[in-house]
Amino acid sequence: MSQSQLDQIKSNALKAFTSAQNSQELYNFKVQFLGKSGALTEAMKLMATLPKEEKPAFGKLVNEVKVELEAAYEKAESALKNKEIDAKMLEEKLDLSFAVSSQEQGKEHPIHKVTNEIFSIMARLGYSLRTGPLIEKDYYNFEALNIPPNHPARDMQDTFFVDDTHVLRTHTSPIQIHSLESEKLPLRIIGTGPVFRVDSDISHLPNFHQIEGMCVDSQVSMSDLKGTISFFVKEFFGPGLKTRFRPSFFPFTEPSAEVDCSCPICKSKGCSLCKQTGWIEIGGCGLINPKVFEHAKVEYPKWQGFAFGFGVERMAIIKYGVDDIRHFPANDVRFLKQF
Ligand code: PHE
């Protein structure tokens, strides 16, 4: 091995390092020249064949080349790395002028919107908000509300049973019992949330929302109930809508009534939504049955009260003139956008 051979290796290596197009190629060159069986290492091994007096000078020379090549490799490596980072950044550059398809803005679901409106109207009458469990004990959903086991009144609400003693609540009226059991009287509460029934058609959903009102005080009459509901309905729907109270039956109220509003779709002329009657039922109401007070251990007639329970989807249908209650859970954005 002569000095000129060594120079050849060095200049080949330097050429290779500067010509490498990417880090991988550069690394392959490093292996080729500086690796374990690379050209320079092989040259070092040849030292053994040299006469003794030439060894130190040649060894020094090889080392110098090695240091020089290592430095050249590092320089080339960092230049390539920078080049690669630059390329990557260019490729990933944010184009702030790029036209994006217009972003839809989310908003409140109509059922939430209606519920919140109802709260704010009732809050003006001194009502405050309560919720309750969706899986109820049979006792709270039925028995405490004067609907004993095996009583025909249970047929009013087709029920999803979870087990022998629990049901998916069929109405928000169990909230009345929770409050009567645990709160100080007098009391004005509004309860809300989903309820579940085995029921599904153009005006019934298996999972819908109710709004429950309850007022308990020392002297409460049917005219307080009618006054409260009439005020509430006028505030919510506006003055153009007519309401009527129809005598009805609920085991937990006595006397009981159903509340109807004039049909906004056909303007009371009769259509499929109002079943040709011109009226849409929004819920039930009545004076709290003394049996309910008895279950909740509230003294009657020292305390008396009224209660009402309305369907939130029904109220939304009437307010916005929606022709099918199933639009609400379907969540089609084209429908939701209109509110
Ligand atoms: N809970 C009854 C229902 O779901 C409605 C109601 C509530 C009636 C309160 C009277 C008093 O049908």
Image: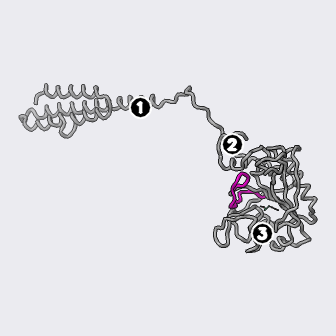
Q: Earlier in the sequence, mark 1 or mark 3?
A: 1
In front here: 50 or 169?
A: 169
Q: How many marks?
A: 3
Q: Position of residue 268 (x, y in %)?
A: 84, 46
Crowding at mark 2 (Cα within 10 Å: few <14, some 14-19, many 20+) = some
Q: Is residue 114 left or right of residue 220?
A: left
Q: Earlier in the sequence, mark 2 or mark 3?
A: 3
The residue indicated by pointer 1 is 85
Numbered range of the magenta stretch: 191-205
Q: Is residue 14 left or right of residue 130?
A: left
Would you say residue 215 is visible in this rendering?
no
Location of residue 175 (image quadrant): bottom right
In front here: 53 or 251?
A: 251
Crowding at mark 3 (Cα within 10 Å: few <14, some 14-19, many 20+) = some
Nearer the observer: mark 1 or 2; the answer is: 2
Q: Earlier in the sequence, mark 1 or mark 2?
A: 1
Q: Are marks 1 and 2 in contact (CB under 8 Å)?
A: no
What numbered label is drawn on residue 336?
2
Identity of the amino acid at label 1? Ile
Crowding at mark 1 (Cα within 10 Å: few <14, some 14-19, many 20+) = few
Would you say residue 70 is visible in this rendering?
yes
The residue indicated by pointer 3 is 153
What residue is drawn where x is 49% and y is 29%? 93
Gap in Å between the C-alphas at discs 2 and 3? 37 Å
What residue is drawn where x is 42% and y is 29%? 86
Nearer the observer: mark 1 or 3; the answer is: 3
Gap in Å between the C-alphas at discs 1 and 3? 76 Å
In front here: 93 or 74?
A: 93
